[in-house]
Image: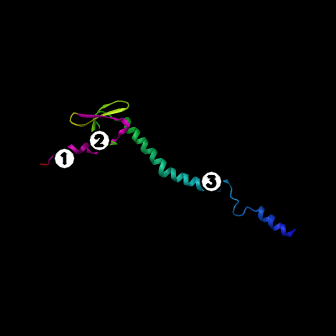
Amino acid sequence: MTMFSGVAYAMGSKGLGGGGGLEVLALPLLFFGIFYLLVFRPQQKQAKKLREFMQNLKVGDRVVTTGGLHGEITGLTDTTVTLEIADRVRVKVTRTAVTGKSQDAAAPEAKTPKG
């Protein structure tokens, strides 16, 4: 009988493999939390900022498109933007193709000769 009591005692103890539910879930939850803070949250903030920018477009804004066209907005609809990219040269692009304000908006003032 003493021979089997040691085996029964070993099987009954929790030992190394007897972790509960919280210990098992702690590491995956930690990884998900870090992933959320490093990837999802900044992406959501950037998407919200772009949505607000799209809603606040107005005629006269200088913008750049995903294709690299820089121009001034001359017309707006719900889905399209008309850009003047040169004198009397206008193109229509989808509203989602506009990615941001044009950096050359201040260029005419900066390129004036000094003195």
Residue 69: image location, x then y, percent = 29, 41
Q: Amino acid at mark 1?
A: Lys
In the image, the segment drawn in magenta is 89-113
Tag 2's secondary structure?
loop
| Disc with the residue nearer the chain's start (2 vs 3) | 3
Residue 54 is situated, as x and y percent measured from the top left of the image, at 37, 37
The kind of residue on which mark 2 rests is: Leu
> Which residue lies under the disc numbered 3?
25
Label 2 and label 3: CA atoms lie apart by: 50 Å
Q: Quadrant of residue 93?
A: top left
Which residue in the structure is indicated by mark 2?
69
Q: Residue at x 84, y 67 (%)?
A: 4
Q: Residue at x 56, y 54 (%)?
A: 30
The residue at the point 20 percent across, 36 percent down is: 87
Q: Earlier in the sequence, mark 3 or mark 1?
A: 3
Mark 1 lies on a secondary structure that is loop
Q: CA distance from mark 2 to mark 1?
A: 20 Å
Instruction: State the residue position of label 1.
Output: 111
C-alpha gap between disc 3 and disc 1: 61 Å
- Mark 2 vs mark 3: give the one in front: 2
Q: Which mark is drawn over residue 62? A: none
Q: Position of residue 55 (x, y in %)?
A: 38, 35
Does the magenta-highlighted stretch encompass residue 30?
Answer: no
**Is residue 98 one of those drawn in magenta?**
yes
